[in-house]
Image (spheres, rainbow, N blue to C red):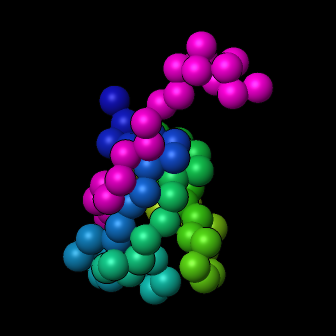
Amino acid sequence: MAKFSVGDVVVGNSRASNHYSITRTGWVGTVRDISGNNIHVFSQDGPGDYWVEAEHFDLVEQQNPVEESDFLQML
């Protein structure tokens, strides 16, 4: 099971600074895609659209999945 889900907001943990130059400790992004142990994250606050290892990030905010019936009501 994946550590994160698409839509989750994540933050770089202490391992991020040791492994990356931009997505460092404290860098916040949103999970856009997942492939194995890697997550595709982006930031709306600055440079950011990266594939990174999930273990270098922690969950800040979990995206609540939308139920299909709720989605259809929004249309």
Say whether residue 37 is left or right of residue 69. Answer: left
Q: Is residue 35 left or right of residue 19?
A: right
Residue 67 lies in magenta, yes or no? yes
Q: Is residue 49 left or right of residue 7?
A: right
Q: How many marks?
A: 0
Is residue 44 or residue 17 the one in the foreground?
A: 44
User: Can residue 37 be seen in the rendering of this structure?
Assistant: no
Q: How far across and down, in percent of the image, does residue 61 sit?
A: 35, 53
75 or 56: nearer the eye? 75
Towards the viewer: 25 or 53: 25
Tell me, yes or no, if residue 9 can be seen here.
yes
User: Relative to 7, is 24 above or below?
Assistant: below
70 in relation to 27, above or below = above
Whether residue 66 is situated above or below residue 45 in the rendered picture:
above
Residue at left offset 76%, top offset 26%: 75
Which residue occupies the extreme bottom position in the image?
21
Q: Position of residue 29 (x, y in %)?
A: 49, 66
Query: Residue at horizontal 58%, vertical 65%?
Result: 42
Front residue of 27 and 38: 27
Q: Residue furthest right?
A: 75
Asked if the stretch drawn in magenta spans residue 65, the answer is yes
Q: Which residues are magenta?
A: 55-75
Residue ID at (27%, 71%):
13
Picture quadrant of residue 1: top left
Q: Residue at x 59, y 50 (%)?
A: 32
